[in-house]
Image (spheres, grey):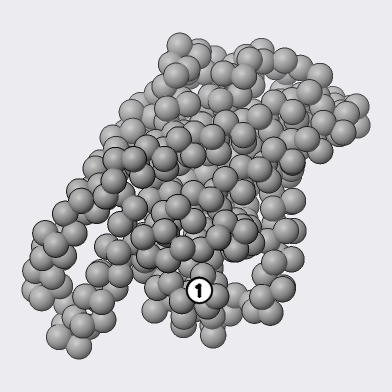
Amino acid sequence: MKKWQFWLGVLISVFFVWISLRGLRLGEFWDVVKGANYWWIIPGIAVYFIAVWVRAWRWHYLLKPIKEIPTITMFPITAIGYMGNNIYPARAGEVLRAVILKRREGVAVSASLATIIVERIFDGVVMLAFVFINLPELARLTSASGFVGNIQQVAIYGTAAFMAALVIFLLAAMFPAVTAKIGQWFIDRVLPTRLRENVTSIMHKFLDGLAALRSPLNILMVFVTSVIIWLFETLKYWFVMHAFGFSVSFFALMLMNGIVNLATTIPSAPGYIGTFDAPGIAVLGAYGINQATAAGYTLTLHAALWIPITLLGAFYLAKEGIKWNDTLRTETT
């Protein structure tokens, strides 16, 4: 990553941290943190790892038309990818897991990335569904939380963007020959001759990665597993909530989950610093939770989401005997 991109992310994170913590009384915050019952985090971490296992199964399912790879093989690679997203800029973990899959199973990086993009599109659709299920609460949030921006409007624009991307990918999957023909037309007219052969090869491998979307049953399976994944993650929110002694409905936590994860698509410092925390605290504030409790809960939740999977991914990466360096980056081509 170029330095300006990294520092832009840092500045955005600083801005969101300022939004989330301004006016916070540190004494009250520290009392909340000291008084929490952290035993509740253990079942929260357990259900989160179940969600990661389901993510690995979903990825295994998307890759089946290319190569049958057991979920038990996919799980460590999935964990490495989430570790990479947590510590490297620009969600580099997505590329990292595609590269490791190529090293271990011989699957082309472009095909893997196609399946990963499909995952992200379905995740976005589910997150927006979580938001729209709670539209009355969303109106309350935008009027009461003081959070920057019109979240309802952002949700509408986000829905349009994710649905448009989903339609494009479904059409590309169902009509690969037509898509390849259109892509080749652009390649022949836009790219220099020396690049055309390589880009054409990448395009065909990318289209191979969309093969799982050629069946309505497969599409349904990917959607259902995406819903299960995010319900398990919301269940982690619910467990951690009990550590802090306040209560909101499961639907409120679904809304929080949807908003904070959509907010993490905003460029930021690695680990989604600030972009996760500010909207989370804002949602709880709209439900009448005082700032100290909301901040203590959200920051603890963020740490519980970040630390375990990062440590596990780092462990699996060490077992691979590789590191994310210039040599590994060359394998993305």
Q: Quadrant of the C terminus?
A: bottom left
Residue 299 in sight from this viewpoint: no
Percent across and percent down for residue 30 are: 87, 32
Above or below: residue 3 compared with residue 170: below
Tell me what residue is drawn at x 42 percent, y 66 percent. 67
The residue positioned 26% from the left and 81% from the top of the image is 198
Would residue 325 be found to the left or right of residue 111 on screen? right
Q: Residue visible at 42% across and 43% down? A: 222
Is residue 300 positioned above or below 267 on the image? above
Query: Dividing the picture into quarters, in which one does residue 38 lie?
Result: top right
Query: Is 52 on the left or on the right of 45, as rendered?
Result: left
Q: Is residue 42 left or right of residue 278?
A: right
Q: Tag 1: residue type?
A: Glu
**Would you place residue 241 above or below residue 114 in this image?**
above
Q: x, y (%) of residue 139?
A: 45, 14
Q: Is residue 9 above or below residue 248?
A: below
* Image x and y of residue 221, in percent: 42, 40
Q: Quadrant of residue 64?
A: bottom left
SS of the residue at dot 1?
Answer: helix
The reply to whether residue 110 is visible in this rendering is yes
Q: Residue at x 37, y 37 (%)?
A: 220
Residue beneath label 1, please?
A: 105
Q: Of all residues shown, which one is farthest toward the bottom?
A: 194
Q: Residues within 10 Å of mark 1 (few under 14, many from 20)?
A: few
Query: How many labels, in total?
Result: 1
Q: Which of the pair 25/191 is nearer the observer?
A: 191
Counting from the top left corner in percent of width and height, residue 266 is at 47, 46
